[in-house]
Amino acid sequence: AQTVTQSQPEMSVQEAETVTLSCTYDTSESDYYLFWYKQPPSRQMILVIRQEAYKQQNATENRFSVNFQKAAKSFSLKISDSQLGDAAMYFCAYSGRDDKIIFGKGTRLHILP
Amino acid sequence: GAVVSQHPSRVICKSGTSVKIECRSLDFQATTMFWYRQFPKQSLMLMATSNEGSKATYEQGVEKDKFLINHASLTLSTLTVTSAHPEDSSFYICSASPQGYNQPQHFGDGTRLSIL
């Protein structure tokens, strides 16, 4: 069975600074997707970034980028120039052949003004 | 972009009541939809896979007689919590993706269910 592990329950970063959220996963599949989702207090699930496992190039979306290490099964999220609106719960997630999404336990990110 | 609508957003009802939650894909067809449950301060846990025109597939530990899923059309899946009790109080959220390769899941805004 696939698993997703986020070892940082909470993190804080100063506004305008850079922060990295960690995630590791386990799977026996060769073709899969990895995601980072943001969940603000409204509890809406917002897709931040998506990585296809067969692509070696790390995905980027504006201030958000990932460090995808397939051999190590690691998928960290870097947020540059942190903004107050980035404060939220961040979930790392995995989706394989069956399209089911498996979520990590989440990291609560605080932005310090 | 693809939109998934979930209704109602909030339900408060008495113990023993059955509650129906709807998940609609507004501008695309979805043969498969997923239902998740999220308890306070926890992650989303997959409950079941809703399959259009056939029986839902439930994750281990999820009671299929308790959580009835119907996916009668390509744009609508419903989750009915039967004879709900306080321990069923949770945040329920659905997701769906357009048919085709490489399509991401889109989430509804969720339903907060409170059983008194």
Image (cartoon, coloured by chain):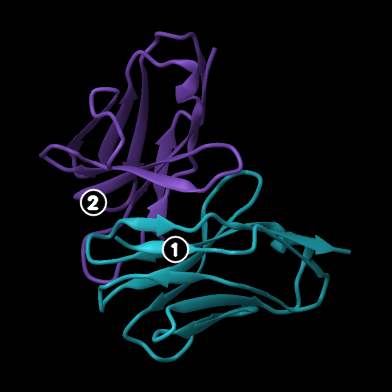
CA neighbours of label 1 inside 10 A, class few (<14), some (14 to 19), many (20+): many
**Percent position of residue B115, x then y:** 51, 16
Seen in the picture, residue B45 relative to A97 is either above or below; the reply is: above
- Tell me where residue B17 sits by quadrant: top left
Amino acid on which the number 2 mark rests in the picture: Gln
**Percent position of residue A83, x then y:** 77, 68
CA neighbours of label 2 inside 10 A, class few (<14), some (14 to 19), many (20+): some
- Tell me where residue B68 sits by quadrant: top left
Q: Which residue is mark 2?
A: B29
Seen in the picture, residue B8 relative to A86 is either above or below; the reply is: above
**Residue drawn at the location 65% of the way across and 78% of the way down:** A63
Which shade is chain B?
purple
The residue lying furthest to the left in this view is B54
* Image quarter in which the C terminus of chain A is found: bottom right
Q: Secondary structure at mark 1?
A: strand
Q: Secondary structure at mark 2?
A: loop
**Residue drawn at the location 52% of the way across and 52% of the way down:** A45
Q: Which chain is cyan?
A: A
Q: Which residue is mark 1?
A: A4
Seen in the picture, residue A7 relative to B69 is either above or below; the reply is: below
